[in-house]
Amino acid sequence: MKRGSKSPHHKNTARPSRGAKASALPPGGRWVIGWHSVMEALKVRPGAIAKLFLKSDAPKDPAVAQLDSMARSSGVSIDKHPAGFFDKLGGGHQGVACQVLESPQLDWEGLGERDTSILLVLDEIEDPHNLGAVMRSAWLMGADGILTPQIRTADVTPTVAKIASGGAEHIPVDPQSNLPRSLSILKEKGFWVFGLEEEGSTDLWETDFPPKIALVVGSEGRGIRSSVRGQCDQFVRIFQCETGASYNASVAAALALGEFRRQHKTP
């Protein structure tokens, strides 16, 4: 089956972080917290860092000193604040944060030109820890992006970026107003749509993945919605020794990403 190359009618509607007042951010900015996440932001997009924030009473630490050095060499201004400032941004901040003025964007037109590509489709995944973990796995496995619905889905908050541990600087999360329609457009670009489901027709380890796929992961409570199911070409199950339970959504996504990348090693 030949699939073409139309563009989707979608909006990238990044929402302001809930952990801090929107007025504390420059227009279009987002908060990033935690050593690894902030360091990756400084590596990937130093020109888009509005400001670096460090804990004022933090003991001397080589990791913090490295962030300080990276920021100064890139011309990023540094502010120091007490712990309470960081606590308002999210848990696990480690006394470091930065304001970033841009986010990764999904290249919809370029997807039609790719020979190999995998996209994650998270259908109403509302747990921020799942989203952050999926973003990290997607980054390390060379995925091109993550699609979500615009409602009933986790936002990319500072806590999510912290869990992604650098993945938020590489993996675009693109909310779709009509997720089934977006999947239809991906098919026109040569993608095949696979749904992860406990009752899938084939086992993950026995599935022959084509070089361009969209991998749908449903919510743990409701699974894949019927409107999204209708766009799936095939349903895949992941082997498990026990019945009556299921894999965490982020674990299921990581297993499937790993199998796709085993079959198609070039990102």
Image: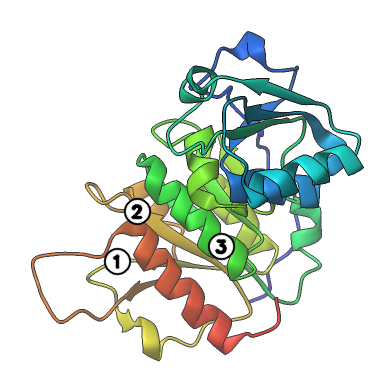
| x, y percent for residue 56 | 62, 24
Check if mark 2's residue and mark 3's residue have beta carbons within 8 Å: no
Q: Residue at x 51, y 39 (%)?
A: 94
In this picture, residue 187 sits left or right of residue 209? right
Q: Quadrant of residue 187?
A: bottom right
| Distance from Cα at disc 2 to Cα at disc 1 | 8 Å
The residue that disc 2 covers is 218
Q: Residue at x 44, y 63 (%)?
A: 232
| Distance from Cα at disc 1 to Cα at disc 3 | 19 Å
Check if mark 1's residue and mark 3's residue have beta carbons within 8 Å: no
Identify the mark nearer the N-term, 1 or 3: 3
| x, y percent for residue 220 | 26, 51
Which amino acid type is shown beneath numbered disc 3? Ala
In this picture, residue 129 sits left or right of residue 170? left
Q: Residue at x 45, y 39 (%)?
A: 92
| x, y percent for residue 116 | 70, 76
In the image, residue 114 sits, relative to residue 52, either above or below, namely below
Q: Is residue 104 visible?
A: no
* Secondary structure at numbered mark 3: helix
Position of the C terminus, as image quadrant, is bottom right
Q: Quadrant of residue 72?
A: top right
Label drawn at residue 138: 3
* Secondary structure at numbered mark 2: strand
Check if mark 2's residue and mark 1's residue have beta carbons within 8 Å: yes
